[in-house]
Image (cartoon, grey):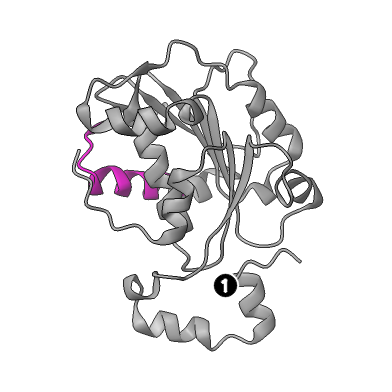
Amino acid sequence: MKDNLVLIPSQRALICSQAKYRHVIGGIGSGMSTGIMYLTALVAQAFMNNRIFIGRTTWPVLRDTSLFDFKNMLATLGITYEYNLSKQTIKLGNGTVIMFRYLNDFAMHKELELGMFVIESLDEIPVEIYNHLRTRLNKTHLVPSRDFYFSDLLRIFGKSWERMSITSSPGKPPKWIRDIWQNPTKPLYESIRFNRDGMDEHLPSDFVESLDELNPKLQAKFVDAVWE
């Protein structure tokens, strides 16, 4: 694995969180998806034979966002994989399987056994599906990678990387999400706010200018992802 990715502060905060249930808040151009896929790739490599679930509302959205971004992240990190088109899975060399599922017609399988799940745009998902996936974080026998690269990472983050989830909201989410993450009272939960600090240099200059020209109301909604 080659890890030369330069992280912005909010991406580092996501990686360094000790919470099992992390919720990311961020707008356009905040680096939110990159941070999520980077951490997912780390967890996928950190444990052998893990099983990770990545979901979005529909197959076109899943294919064009999360699946596309995750493949790009694996390529950036030099991680080889096998992609099974019919099963919509990615299998890594350490035996970890990442399954991609669209959630509009998701059947709540009780036999799912997961070590992690990821849902971008959780605000599009019914609370019942989120709660069901929480009950499926029951993967046992998570064997740490023997790769020396992960020894220090697992010493620091190992417990919080076991049976964890990452979700995100690009704007003001429904009440049930705010009830969980707006003012979490338990250390299991943490919300991490992403902004454009450190991101502008990675974005096309004309795109940055177009974001800056938005009126304050649109800035708050689409760029700053203000919850209030």
Q: Is residue 30 magenta?
A: no
Where is residue 72 drawn, in percent x and y?
A: 30, 49
Query: In the rendered image of this protein, does residue 157 appear above or below residue 64?
Result: above
Main SS category, magenta section: helix
Q: Picture coordinates of residue 184 (x, y %)?
A: 72, 44
- Toward the viewer: 145 or 136? 145
Against 113, is 11 above or below?
Answer: below
Q: Nearer the viewer, residue 104 or 11?
A: 11
The C terminus: image quadrant: bottom right
- Tell me the residue at 32%/44% (across/down): 71
Q: Which residue is drawn at 34% across and 28% down?
A: 46
Above or below, comparing residue 25 to residue 109 in the picture: below
Is 73 one of the magenta-colored residues?
yes
Question: Which SS class for mark 1?
Answer: helix
Which residue type does callout 1 highlight?
Answer: Val
* Left or right: residue 157 compared with residue 112: left
Q: Which residue is drawn at 24% across and 44% down?
A: 77
Q: In this view, does 114 lie to the left or right of 2?
A: right
> What stretch of residues is rendered in magenta?
66-81
Q: Residue at x 72, y 63 (%)?
A: 227
**Disc 1 marks which residue?**
223
Tell me where residue 15 appears, x and y as whole percent.
Answer: 43, 45
Residue 34 screen position, x and y as percent: 40, 54
Quadrant location, the N terminus: top left
Q: Badge 1 local density, few (<14 within 10 Å), some, or many (20+)?
A: many
